[in-house]
Each structure stands twice: as C-alpha cells, then as structure tokens.
Image (cartoon, grey):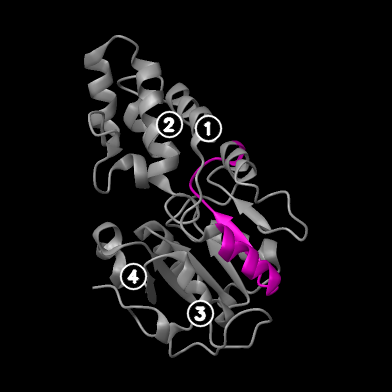
Amino acid sequence: MAPLNHLTFAARAGLPPLALASAFDAIIFDKDGTLMNFAASWNPAIHAGICERSGDDLQLRERIASTIGFDMNERQPLRDAPVIHASNAELLEMLEPHTDGRALLDACARRVIEHATPAAHADTVLRALCDAQIPCAVATNDEESSTAQQLRALGWLHHEPPLIGGVLCCDSGHGGKPEPGMVLAAAARLGVDVSRCAMVGDSAADLLAGRRAGCAATLLVGPPEAVAQHAPLADHWMRDLGELLRPVEDCPAAA
C-alpha cells in the first residue's frame, strides 16, 4: 500500500486516533464496486436485462453479452469488462449495432433496485463519517435517476443529517470519469476544497478522476484479485471500506 506521509491527520469525534478517514475534510465515493456490492447488485440485473431484450433469440443474446463482456452461463462480467467500467454513453454506442441499447440499460436499471446490496462496511462507514462531521458525496458514471433509486433503496438518502451530501452522475452536466469535472463538482457541492478531499473507488477511472481533480489522495478499495492492476494510481489501497475507520498502521498491506 502506498504511504500517506503527505497528509496531516486530525482528531475527529467518534473515530479512532489517526483513523484514515480523519485525514480528510470530505470523502467522495464511487458507487458500483465501492459503496455497492457490484456482483450482488448488478449481476442478476444484467442477466435479466439481457434475457428481457433478447427474448428467444439466443444468437442475439450471445452478441449482446459478448459486446458488453458478460458471461451468461456464469452470470457475471468478465474481468475488466465494458459493462463494469465503460460509461453509459460508451455502452450505448457499442450496443447500437445489435439492439436498442437504451432499452437494455433501462431494463437493467429497473432490475437492480430489487437487488441493491451495500458493499461490506459501507453503511457503517457512512454513518461513522456522518457522526464525525466528515461530509460524503457520490460520483458515479451511472445516471441520476437510476442512482437516486438505488441509494434510496439502500436507505442512504433519507437520513438527517444526510449520509450523502451530493450525488453527481454522468448526466449531471460535468462529464464522466476519468475526467475530473464530476469530482470537482462533488467537492463544490460539499463546500470543501477538492485538495482536502479523498476520492475512493475500485477502478482506474475513479483514481484518474481524483488525481486530475487535485484530490488530497486517491484510495483504491477491493481485494487484490479484483483491483491489483490499478494500485499504481492509488495513494493507498484498502481491502474494504472498513479500513477508512482504522488507523493506517492497522490496515494490512495488500499483496
């Protein structure tokens, strides 16, 4: 894991001394694969959406699945598949020769509400940060309507004070990740200088967006088998979100 020697830790009420989160005035999270468990939330939704759009046409089903990198037999994406990391605009362009991409994305978005599952420790972390008065935002390449429904399903948008103080999406008018606009807008929404924010995510796009925006640190989250290839872009690598609440020296390095 990369050191955070350039950061100055501050005491935060309710957080352990030198907890990683206490180094920042605000934290900006990616959604899928970071705050939400991608496999539990999206795998069944994507499978159902492809089946809905392809009907009985098995050749069309296979073309759609191959285009977005989804294994219909295993009911999961391939490693670094477009369906995981590509923007919705990119997916629509890829799908255009095969099917109505908009209808497919909408079908998946409807289905994911039934399966929305938080990532490990996500709920605990958001509530602890709220108690410590460290505001949080979400910056995701998903769309506003779908994202709001998912966050409501998880109970994170109906809390006082709010667990999530800003939600920026690919259609919010600030561009998508890996460009920095969404992260800059999230920091502005929280009223915190971006140089005092951390960007937390599981993909290269998340980390590049944070770096380009000038965040204090980019924090990679996920197990080695899923995210190791992105480690060079991160200032710190966490196995799970719970490490935000622990002192850096207690966070095990990922091999």
Nearer the camera: disc 3 or disc 1: 1
Query: Residue 244 shows which numbered tag?
Result: none
> Which is more N-terminal, label 3 or label 4?
3
> Which is more N-terminal, label 1 or label 2?
2
Residue 93 falls left or right of residue 122: left
Q: Report which residue position mark 2 lands on.
A: 45
Q: Position of residue 132 (x, y in %)?
A: 68, 75
Taking depth in this image into account, of 177 and 221 the one nearest to the observer is 221
Q: CA distance from mark 3 to mark 2?
A: 34 Å
- Look at the picture and state if 251 lies above or below 150: below
Specify few, some or many for label 2: CA neighbours under 10 Å numbering under 14, 14-19, or 20 or more.
Answer: many
Which three-letter amino acid code belongs to the residue tagged 2?
Answer: Ala
- Look at the picture and state if 240 lies above or below 255: above
Residue 239 falls left or right of residue 165: left
Q: Which image quadrant for residue 50?
A: top left
Taking depth in this image into account, of 219 and 183 the one nearest to the observer is 219
Residue at left offset 57%, top offset 41% = 150
Question: Which span is picked out in magenta?
Answer: 123-145
Can residue 87 be seen here? The reply is no
Q: CA distance from mark 4 to mark 3?
A: 18 Å
Q: Report which residue position mark 3 lands on.
A: 20
